[in-house]
Amino acid sequence: MRRLIAVLSLASLMAVGFSTFAIAAELVSEEETYFLRRDDCGGDADHLHLSTRSGADSEGCAFLFGVANEAGLGLSYDFPQEDGTTYLLDTAGEVTGTIATTDFFGLGGTVGLMTVEVKVTGMDGFTTVTLIDEVYENVPATGTNPSFDFSADIDDALAGTEISNLNVSVVIRGVQANQTIAMSGDSSFTFDHLVPEQ
């Protein structure tokens, strides 16, 4: 009986020791990047998602021309995180990214005006957390395919937040003829999070 109590006591001390070590471990900041990916643009196997790996993507889905988009029928895309990873946000850090565009005619140029809305959210348990909510209004889209860079500090109110189920929402509107999101490594976002020091 005494031996059993001693073993249990030792196990308890080891558990406390490991727990104390985990609590006392220094945390350092690290960046994570997710790329906007698409498998089969406009096809039956289409699959919009976020991935930590870049690659060649299916691009160039056609859509109704710009006047309809300006009337409120904007192109809306959602790219969800699917790897199940949870991150501890570093509120001393920031969220940055780029939404690149391309013309689905493949001519390398555009005509007209464009409004791009970018929203990056995640889940803290059952609560939705917003990391980025930006609108770029009436950006000239003449000539070269434009890119939209965004950046914001991570809100201090999110200190200690463990975030998962990240999602990037992009809406494109405007009196412009043929623009959509460029992927294949061109559109992504990066955020700072905390990890135990090695």
Image (cartoon, rainbow, N blue to C red):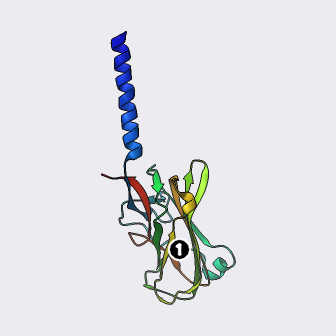
The N terminus lies in quadrant: top left
Question: Which residue is at 54% across, 62% downward?
Answer: 156
Please state which of residues 194 and 111 is positioned toward the viewer in this rendering: 194
**Which residue is at the front of the view, 129 or 16?**
16
Q: Residue furthest left?
A: 198
**Front one among 29 and 150:** 29
Estimate the x, y position of residue 172 in percent, counting from the top left.
Answer: 58, 75
Residue 51 sits in which quadrant? bottom left
Above or below, comparing residue 129 to residue 23 in the picture: below
* Type of amino acid under label 1: Ala
Residue pictured at 52% horizontal, 79% vertical: 179
Residue 194 on image: x %, y %:
42, 56
Q: Kindly state the secondary structure of the residue where label 1 is placed.
A: loop
Q: Nearer the viewer, residue 48 or 162?
A: 162
Q: Is residue 39 visible?
A: no
Quick check: 119 above or below 106? Answer: above
Give x and y (percent) for residue 98. 46, 73
* Residue 140, image quadrant: bottom right
Q: Is residue 113 visible?
A: yes
The residue indicated by pointer 1 is: 62
User: Quick check: 143 above or below 133?
Assistant: below
Q: Is residue 119 above or below residue 68?
A: above
Q: Is residue 198 left or right of residue 83?
A: left
Residue name at image x 46 percent, y 71 percent: 97
Which quadrant of the structure image shows residue 50?
bottom left
Q: Is residue 191 left or right of residue 69?
A: left
